[in-house]
């Protein structure tokens, strides 16, 4: 990290004119205390009861109001698109093609989805569509669409509240006056995600036909399927606490291994209802906060647990097919006109979605795939404008720019088609904000990624509810290609609309 220096700020900046020393002395203690007091925190890897302040920004980041509005408006369309994809035979055909080159993950999910015999027809999508803002057009471009285990719905609300608190405190103000509004600063929206994501879960829970419908709230629960030693524990806890506070719905946290040990199918009927043995509670909704990458299935019993849960009568958030729909390959295919046409009739709607796409190429033997291979192999400098992505989630999996050709040479060409080649989105970096991690300030060029949450409850024939569910801003050093907060590259942030 380069040393922190006080930059000369342009006249009309939405950031307050504070020196690093002023921030360290006046803002940081308040920020830390508020964060610890209100749960803007992460758990220690080795000791879950020990918490530290989550990596965050000092200031909210200015985002054009029209950009935010545009992303919000699109969310229900994206929710519906991915719901339709998950219901389609097309998805299963495309997923089948990935099994030979990715047998260890996509192949296993696909085989399980194919064999799944659950009697539950309702499915719950808890989604997050991620965007970067293209520098020249100031238009959102989609980085990816997440359909499994989306995180930060809890902490996103908290960081918005933190920034509002610092604002109203006047802690940003250099003159000592209790004001912090400065040129160009607009509304500070606080993300509703910590309430709207639980609402999505609650809608599914309410629709679940329990053995004891009159006493469902007492006799049933939502199962959170989680990783052991989860550092992002408190983000999940916000969802859990809000389910109880707002809807009276109880939750049970289980790792895959615990699920296999502590759950069984009931003999009440032949629906494979799940019962939690220790409490006798029936599991109405299975909510995955793990299971999105190979490491989450660290032994065979994890795969067995997934199968046990999938075949059950509980409503899954998400089902295997919803998870498969979120693959990078599907995202690439949807950028092809003739594929998008299968799912969207309305031309105006299609146009709005297409505006958010950048070029994505397959690496197969199709015409487009051959073009993709050529472009991939031509990425020989740091100026190359492509990123190579495997069918994986959770950050740290991509291969960037000039690393692409050498990487491809390490794998057999027959396996290249489990990767996609995506145009890099050109983002404007800012030097105005400070990042805080482990109590230390960093001031280097940063860029921000906007996430929009959505929830959709549906079956084969109908959509029962489809809603926008809040927002997320993550800000990272522009020098790091990846932006994962948990992975250690980024921070949670909030917006000020300009
Ligand atoms: P994951 O599912 O692992 O989160 P992403 O597709 O979100 O994978 O990629 C991880 C990160 O890589 C993103 O958060 C972003 O910072 C960067 N990234 C991915 N695609 C692009 C792109 N097309 N242009 C610029 N940066 C990108
Ligand atoms: Mg992802
Ligand atoms: Mg991502």
Image: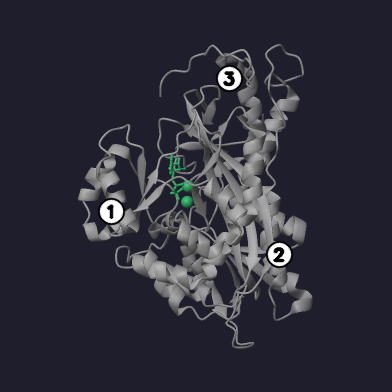
In the current view of this chain or complex, which residue is farthest to the front?
347
**Label 3: how many Cα within 10 Å (few below 14, some 14–19, many 20+):** some
Q: Is residue 239 above or below residue 70?
A: below
- Which quarter of the rendered picture does the N terminus lie within? top left
In the current view of this chain or complex, which residue is farthest to the right?
214
| Residue named by callout 2 | 203
Indicate the secondary structure of the residue bearing disc 2.
Answer: helix
Quadrant of residue 18 in the image? top right
* Rendered residue at 47%/18% (across/down): 4
Q: Is residue 438 above or below residue 154?
A: above
Mark 2 or mark 3, whichever is nearer to me: 2
| Residue named by callout 3 | 24
Mark 1 or mark 3, whichever is nearer to me: 1
Q: Nearer the viewer, residue 215 or 353?
A: 353
Indicate the secondary structure of the residue bearing disc 1.
Answer: helix
| Residue named by callout 1 | 370
* Rendered residue at 24%/49% (across/down): 408
For marks 1 and 3, give the CA distance: 54 Å
């Amino acid at each position: 990290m380069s040393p922190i220096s006080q930059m000369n700020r342009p006249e009309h900046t939405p950031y307050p004119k504070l020196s690093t020393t002023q921030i360290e002395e006046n803002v940081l203690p308040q920020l830390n205390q508020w964060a610890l007091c209100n749960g803007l925190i992460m758990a220690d890897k080795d000791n879950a009861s020990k918490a530290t302040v989550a990596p965050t920004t000092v200031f909210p980041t200015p985002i054009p109001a029209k950009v935010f509005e545009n992303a919000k408006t699109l969310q229900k369309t994206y929710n519906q698109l991915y719901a339709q994809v998950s219901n389609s035979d097309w998805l299963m055909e495309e997923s089948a093609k990935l099994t030979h080159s990715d047998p260890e993950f996509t192949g296993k999910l696909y085989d399980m989805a194919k064999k799944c015999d659950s009697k539950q027809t309702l499915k719950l999508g808890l989604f997050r569509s991620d965007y970067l803002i293209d520098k020249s057009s100031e238009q959102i471009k989609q980085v990816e669409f997440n359909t499994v285990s989306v995180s930060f719905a809890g902490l996103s609300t908290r960081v918005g509240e933190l920034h509002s608190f610092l604002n109203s405190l006047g802690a940003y103000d250099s003159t000592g006056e209790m004001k912090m509004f400065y040129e160009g600063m607009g509304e500070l929206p606080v993300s509703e995600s910590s309430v709207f994501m639980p609402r999505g879960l609650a809608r599914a829970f309410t629709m679940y036909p329990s053995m004891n419908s009159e006493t469902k709230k007492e006799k049933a629960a939502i199962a959170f399927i989680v990783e052991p030693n989860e550092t992002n524990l408190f983000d999940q806890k916000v969802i859990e606490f809000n389910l109880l506070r707002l809807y009276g719905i109880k939750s049970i946290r289980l790792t895959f291994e615990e699920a296999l040990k502590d759950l069984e199918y009931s003999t009440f009927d032949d629906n494979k209802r799940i019962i939690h043995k220790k409490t006798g509670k029936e599991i109405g909704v299975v909510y995955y906060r793990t299971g999105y990458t190979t490491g989450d299935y660290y032994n065979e019993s994890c795969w067995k647990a997934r199968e046990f849960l999938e075949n059950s009568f509980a409503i899954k958030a998400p089902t295997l097919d919803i998870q498969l729909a979120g693959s990078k390959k599907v995202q690439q295919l949807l950028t092809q006109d003739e594929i998008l046409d299968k799912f969207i009739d309305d031309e105006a709607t299609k146009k709005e979605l297409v505006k958010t796409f950048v070029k994505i190429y397959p690496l197969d033997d199709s015409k487009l795939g051959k073009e993709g291979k050529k472009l991939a192999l031509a990425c020989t400098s740091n100026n190359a404008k492509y990123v190579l992505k495997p069918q994986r989630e959770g950050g740290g999996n991509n291969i960037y720019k000039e690393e692409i050709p050498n990487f491809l040479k390490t794998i057999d060409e027959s396996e290249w088609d489990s990767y996609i080649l995506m145009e890099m989105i050109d983002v404007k970096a800012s030097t105005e904000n400070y990042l805080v991690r482990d109590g230390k300030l960093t001031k280097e060029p940063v860029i921000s990624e906007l996430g929009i949450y959505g929830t959709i409850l549906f079956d084969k024939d109908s959509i029962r509810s489809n809603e926008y569910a809040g927002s997320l801003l993550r800000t990272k050093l522009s020098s790091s290609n990846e932006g994962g907060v948990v992975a250690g590259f980024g921070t949670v942030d909030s917006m000020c609309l300009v």
